Image (cartoon, rainbow, N blue to C red):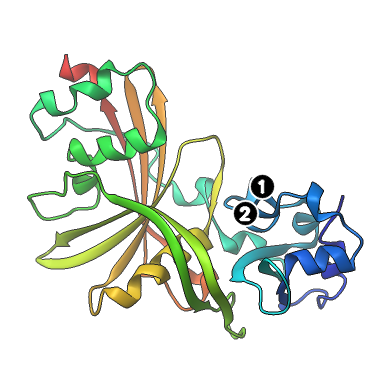
Amino acid sequence: MRIFEPALRQLRPGGWSVFGPTSFRRYLEENGFDDRRIDTAAMISVDSLDRLAPELKEAEAMVLRLGRAQDGPGTQFAVIGTPGRLEDFFLIDADVFTQTEPEVYVPDCDLREILPYYLLPKLTERCLVNLAFASGLMGYALGLDKPWPRAAPATGAGTFSFTVVPYPGGDALKHVSGQVEIDALFVGRRSGHEIAFVLESKMEPASSLAKHKLVYASKAVTPRLGSTPVVAVYLRCETHGSTVWYDIVECAEPNTELIRLRAVQHRRILLDLQVVV
């Protein structure tokens, strides 16, 4: 099923344009698709370029999930047609992982504090994120003032409303009371200034991260932070035997325009858990 074909036919060829926002369930019904056979989240909440529907890739178009529908049931979505700039909606690993030679990090903590991570036969993504904090690796990678944050970062989800501009000169799209998941939220000091960091972590094989995952999380927390700046961080974790590979990409403070979120620093850091035994 090429679900997005009807939406794509309404976009302007070769330029920026938007279909929607509109109810995804209503869209499916109007175009003869059985919504009971379609995974809404998989179709319209895409977190990497690999998972974008084939017809969207072919047309160089992006899809965004935008919260509660205003013109029908369920969730609303929009399809954005681009002038050959689909990849601008993603942080592509091959482009943003610029440090090819990894650094080896020696934990800056009492090694007994991270011994449990060595004892577990398999570490989950959440464990690997917590390990980055407990060992001091995250504070080191981001150049934070000591004492570094070591407690497990806050994580959770909630419903949030905000606006997002998908591309330069485009109209703002409303994200209405939609769920946003935050993999990690923490506050650190750098050069004496407090900064809130939102982090999106990935462990499974992939080659990119959709920028809206970081921008949505940033916009969700910003209203409660006052003048405290928000920095978005993309973290990819891999395990190789007893060694954990961390790719940590710090991004510029999220811009109003989604595609202008950009990577400003990459660190590739290895942590060998055998040092704790």
Q: Which residue is mark 1?
A: 51
The percent position of residue 264, horizontal first and vertical second, equals 37, 60
Which residue type carries mark 2? Val
Judge whether 258 appears above or below 250 on screen. below
| Circle 2 residues within 10 Å: few <14, some 14–19, many ≥20 | many
C-alpha separation, residue under disc 2 versus residue under disc 1: 6 Å
Query: Quick one: SS at disc 1?
Result: helix
Whether residues under marks 2 and 1 lie with C-beta atoms below 8 angstroms apart, the answer is yes
Q: In screen coordinates, is 49 left or right of 210?
A: right
Q: Quadrant of residue 21?
A: bottom right
Which residue type carries mark 1? Arg
Q: In screen coordinates, is 105 left or right of 157?
A: left
Q: Which residue is mark 2?
A: 46
Q: Residue at x 73, y 76 (%)?
A: 20
Q: Residue at x 86, y 62 (%)?
A: 5
Q: Residue at x 21, y 33 (%)?
A: 105
Can see residue 221?
Answer: yes
Q: Residue at x 13, y 49 (%)?
A: 148
